[in-house]
């Protein structure tokens, strides 16, 4: 009876328990702060340029960390939780070149990410403090980098071959195809301005490359923006300025084109011109920041424009344009958005639902957002002047829980980037301000023309380039927050590994690189419980100073050993450098150590680089320990090339290239006969500039 009663009770309670846990799960999934404003502090001047959301609702921001009053910089990646908690932050550099710039980030396969940009060299020695300017000598290569979800580099490559002589290149946009390939748009500069559209597979292998150019030498283009359409084909648009023989004026407008995704062949293209651009007025064309495919298959792109430059140090445009064309690129509508603030510039766009878009803007002082539908109608508009003065924007992100955007000081970056999260209607009351936008159709001010550009196939090659990584300091301060819950953080005990190639984290991720790794769990209210794991891989030290060396005519000698160790002990002096400059002859040593052991190497630095060859004329290999070996004396510091001994019939009885080896009077398994033998020694001076050959005779006595 009791058993039956318990069974009935279980059948009643079980569905209730399922419903309870399901509701808890739903609550955990939707509990993200309605809005917040975080002011971050960073180690150096930096600025964010792109941001994406992960499948775990985390945020990854790509940017660039600059030196103060300098063009020199490295690439910067930071990963945040949905509540803005820092999960990791890293700076990327290469020792081969002194400038690295990230431009965009997109998801790749297996929870990895593709980052694009460029690297090059800047002549930092030409800095002039009186004019705050460089005389720049800059060589530039387009950069691709694939990282895992912890920011570790999987591979990194540069566009190494010169498709045209004296070329430099940078990537301006990247999109992902349905089957996981990537489409890249590149600026390609030589004596002529080119546009390059390229398709690569997930491992960076080139499938096709289309090179776009003009027959006119007086042609220039802005950064291209890409979009993969639902049918798989590619549309792109960019500012274009061309002067050719067919028209008596400089044609300046927006070039809109479509390519076949499989072959890269042109499908259609048009040039959109403003009627007032036919005059000599100094029109300003902003970058295209977004292309969208609307629900009716129309195409739309967002940019900024001004009839004449606005008198502002940073932004020069005064209205935002929304070009709408049909699926063949035929212009249908142009909507102009203007505001009481000036300048007025669109910096980024996030697609939000079917045809809706949130446009992030600024006036060089304050951020603004507006939401438009597929017709271009304004649904809402918000200002955020309360975050502080002098703010510029670059990237906005749309999620199921609201919108995120970053801002930074408009002098090119700052040490206090700001992150604002709004709700789904753009509300963030603690930083909001009044802002009004008006819209009107100005399609009559624009018309279309053909622009006959050359489309040609070209070869392209990416080559590996090594990148280094530093942890990059960033710390957040909550200025305001409406919170349904808060993230919880903890740091596990450090894991120090010796001569081990991999480590498995509690979430079964296998890591092979030292660094800080995060494991994220969910609290009952849906916030993140974050555990930081510091994993340190060490291996038995390796150290080598190479062969003995010399001064010769030099006044110093530079000693080098393997890099990558925290400290180096040079002749008892501890430094953090694998390089040591020697000013006096002598014996020098270096010692490195870690938890896996300690290693020391020694080298002799001599004043002279050349030494006369003196050899004994007899030896007695009788096993008494005295004069049993015939070898080059230790006092000779030349580098041995060869040491050969022949008997009286010209037969070789001994040969070596190792200066520490000598002849013990044996000819194979047998004792050599008593008598006279001929030796030939070939040596080089320590600096490798001179070769010595010494021929002589030695008598074997037993």
Image (cartoon, rainbow, N blue to C red):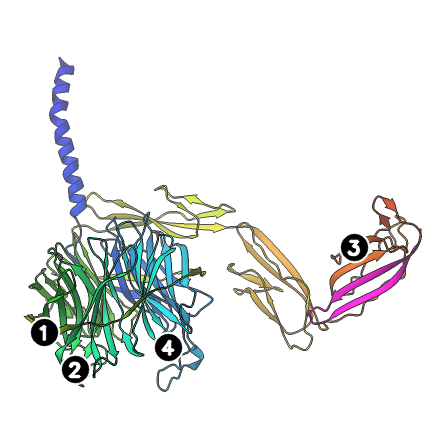
Residue tagged 2: 278
Residue displayed at 13% across by 23% down: 11
Check disc 2 and report its element: helix, strand or loop: helix
Q: How many marks?
A: 4
Residue 131 position, x and y percent, is 35, 86
Q: Is residue 44 visible?
A: no
With 589 as the anchor, is 108 left or right in this view? left
With 325 as the anchor, is 60 left or right in this view? right
Check disc 1 and report its element: helix, strand or loop: strand
Query: Which of the two marks, 1 or 3, is nearer to us in this view?
Result: 3
In-front residue for pair 349/322: 322
First in residue order: circle 2 vs circle 1: 2
Residue tagged 1: 339
Query: Which of the two marks, 1 or 4, is nearer to us in this view?
Result: 4
Q: CA distance from mark 4 to mark 3?
A: 59 Å
Q: For residue 378, which quarter of the picture? A: bottom left
The overriding secondary structure of the stretch rendered in magenta is strand
Query: Which of the two marks, 2 or 3, is nearer to us in this view?
Result: 2
Residue tagged 4: 191
Q: Tell me which segment is drawn in magenta.
A: 677-702
Residue 103 position, x and y percent, is 31, 65
Query: Which of the two marks, 4 or 3, is nearer to us in this view?
Result: 4
First in residue order: circle 1 vs circle 3: 1
Check disc 3 and report its element: helix, strand or loop: strand
Mark 2 Cα-neighbour bin, 10 Å: few <14, some 14–19, many ≥20: some
User: Which dot marks residue 655?
Assistant: 3
């Amino acid at each position: 009876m009791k058993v039956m009663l318990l069974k009935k009770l279980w059948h009643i309670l079980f569905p209730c328990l399922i419903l309870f846990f399901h509701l808890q799960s739903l609550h955990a999934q939707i509990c993200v702060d309605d809005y917040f404003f975080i002011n971050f502090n960073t180690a150096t001047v930096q600025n964010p340029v792109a941001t994406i959301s992960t499948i775990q609702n985390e945020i990854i921001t790509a940017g660039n960390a600059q030196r103060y009053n300098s063009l020199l910089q490295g690439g910067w990646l930071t990963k945040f939780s949905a509540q803005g908690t820092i999960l990791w932050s890293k700076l990327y550099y290469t020792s081969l070149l002194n400038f690295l710039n990230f431009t965009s980030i997109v998801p790749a396969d297996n929870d990895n990410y593709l980052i694009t940009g460029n690297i090059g060299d800047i002549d930092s020695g030409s800095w002039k403090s009186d004019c705050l300017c460089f005389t720049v000598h800059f060589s530039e290569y387009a950069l691709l980098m694939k990282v895992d979800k912890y920011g570790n580099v999987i591979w990194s490559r540069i566009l190494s071959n010169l498709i045209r002589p004296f070329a430099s290149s940078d990537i301006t946009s990247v999109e992902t195809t349905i089957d996981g390939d990537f489409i890249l748009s590149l600026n390609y500069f030589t004596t002529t301005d080119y546009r390059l559209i390229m398709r690569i597979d997930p491992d960076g292998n080139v499938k096709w490359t289309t090179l776009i150019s003009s027959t006119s030498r007086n042609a220039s283009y802005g950064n291209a923006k890409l979009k993969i359409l639902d049918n798989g084909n590619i549309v792109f648009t960019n500012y274009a300025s061309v002067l050719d023989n067919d028209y008596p004026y400089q044609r300046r407008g927006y070039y809109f084109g479509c390519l076949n995704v499989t072959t890269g062949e042109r499908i259609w293209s048009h040039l959109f011109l403003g009627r007032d651009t036919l005059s000599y007025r100094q029109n300003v064309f902003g970058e295209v920041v977004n292309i969208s495919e609307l629900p009716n298959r129309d195409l739309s792109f967002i940019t900024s424009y001004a009839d004449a430059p606005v008198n502002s140090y940073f932004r020069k445009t005064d209205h935002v344009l929304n070009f709408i064309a049909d699926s063949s690129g035929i212009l249908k509508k142009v909507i102009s958005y203007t505001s009481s603030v000036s300048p007025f510039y669109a910096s980024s766009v996030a697609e939000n639902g079917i045809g809706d878009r949130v446009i992030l803007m600024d006036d060089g002082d304050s951020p603004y957002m507006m939401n438009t539908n597929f017709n271009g109608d304004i649904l809402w508009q918000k200002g955020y002047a309360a975050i502080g003065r002098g703010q510029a924007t670059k990237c906005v992100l749309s999620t199921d829980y609201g919108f995120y955007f970053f801002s930074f000081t408009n002098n090119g970056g700052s040490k206090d980037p700001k992150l604002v999260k709004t709700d789904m209607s753009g509300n963030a009351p603690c930083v909001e301000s009044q802002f009004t936008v008006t819209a009107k159709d100005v399609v009559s001010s624009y018309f279309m023309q053909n622009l006959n550009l050359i489309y040609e196939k070209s070869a392209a090659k990416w080559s590996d380039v090594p990148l280094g990584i530093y942890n990059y300091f960033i710390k957040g301060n909550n200025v305001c927050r409406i919170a349904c819950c808060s993230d919880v953080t903890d740091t596990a005990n450090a894991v120090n590994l010796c001569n081990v190639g991999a480590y498995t984290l509690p979430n079964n991720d296998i890591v092979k690189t030292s660094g800080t790794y995060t494991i994220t769990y969910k609290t009952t209210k849906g916030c993140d419980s974050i555990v930081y794991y510091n994993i340190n891989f060490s291996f038995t030290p390796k150290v080598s100073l190479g062969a003995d060396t010399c001064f010769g005519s030099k006044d110093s000698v530079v000693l080098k050993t393997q890099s990558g160790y925290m400290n180096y002990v040079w002749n008892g002096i501890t430094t953090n450098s694998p390089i040591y400059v020697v000013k006096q002859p002598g014996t020098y040593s270096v010692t490195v150590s870690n938890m896996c052991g300690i290693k020391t190497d020694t080298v002799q630095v001599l004043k002279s680089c050349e030494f006369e060859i003196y050899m004994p004329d007899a030896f007695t290999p009788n096993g008494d320990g005295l004069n049993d070996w015939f070898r080059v004396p230790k006092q000779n510091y030349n580098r041995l090339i060869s040491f050969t001994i022949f008997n009286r019939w010209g037969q070789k009885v001994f040969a070596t290239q190792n200066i520490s080896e000598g002849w013990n009077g044996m000819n194979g398994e047998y004792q050599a006969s008593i008598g006279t033998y001929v030796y030939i020694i070939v040596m080089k001076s320590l600096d490798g500039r001179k070769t010595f050959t010494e021929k002589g005779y030695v008598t074997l006595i037993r």
